[in-house]
Image: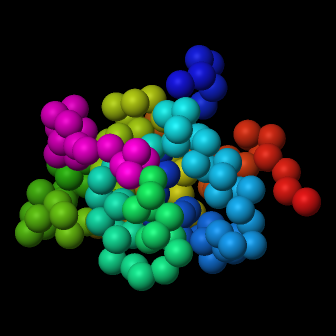
């Protein structure tokens, strides 16, 4: 990993939006740049994002299968933080935290690894919070995929 460079924790919403707007076969340079970030340890995502993507049958699923280094298994720190999120948002009454999708896990991984969260979500939702709402509550930086591209100085012609 490059010292002093941002590390990003990406949600499935950004990967799915990226695939829709910038298809892999039309924008190979973008997808190579994402692959390079993964190889450098600067782009990570919780395993739960893989579980969401793996339900698909498109080129994103194929791409993700060849980039398993992107996906980080949960550890005790993340598990404890997801429990804190559940408590803070009164989610403890939900049947299982798994039903909440990957969102709390994205936030927990970003908190544990000091990352910028990348998602396409916006707005506020109760009782199940959206990623930007959780990022604001826990003072985590949040951005969208196009801002990641700008921050990294990527251009495509």
Q: Is residue 157 left or right of residue 55?
A: right
Q: How is the image coloured?
A: rainbow
Of the pair 107 and 44, the residue shown nearer to us: 44
Q: In the orientation shown, which residue stands out farthest toward the bottom?
A: 57
Q: Which residues are magenta?
A: 68-83
Q: Quadrant of residue 55?
A: bottom left
Which quadrant of the figure contains the C terminus? bottom right
Q: In the orientation shown, which residue stands out farthest toward the front?
A: 66
**Number of marks in the rendered image:** 0
Give the residue displayed 52% in from the left and 42% down from the top: 38
Of the pair 145 and 92, the residue shown nearer to us: 145
Q: Residue 147 at what x, y percent from top left? A: 71, 50
Give the residue displayed 22% in from the left and 32% down from the top: 77
Compared with residue 63, is residue 44 higher up or lower down, i.e. above or below?
above
- The answer to whether residue 102 is magenta is no
Give the residue displayed 39% in from the left and 69% down from the top: 53
Q: Residue 78 at what x, y percent from top left? A: 24, 39
């Amino acid at each position: 990993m490059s010292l002093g460079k941002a590390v990003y924790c990406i949600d499935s919403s950004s990967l799915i939006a990226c695939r829709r707007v910038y298809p892999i076969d039309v924008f190979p340079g973008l997808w190579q740049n994402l692959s390079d970030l993964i190889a450098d340890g600067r782009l990570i995502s919780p395993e739960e994002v893989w579980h969401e993507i793996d339900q698909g049958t498109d080129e994103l699923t194929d791409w993700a299968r060849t980039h398993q280094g992107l996906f980080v298994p949960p550890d005790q720190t993340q598990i404890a933080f997801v429990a804190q999120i559940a408590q803070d948002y009164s989610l403890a009454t939900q049947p299982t935290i798994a039903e909440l999708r990957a969102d709390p896990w994205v936030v927990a991984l970003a908190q544990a690894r000091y990352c910028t969260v990348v998602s396409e979500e916006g707005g506020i939702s109760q009782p199940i919070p959206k990623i930007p709402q959780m990022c604001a509550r826990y003072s985590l930086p949040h951005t969208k995929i196009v801002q990641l591209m700008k921050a990294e100085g990527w251009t495509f012609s």
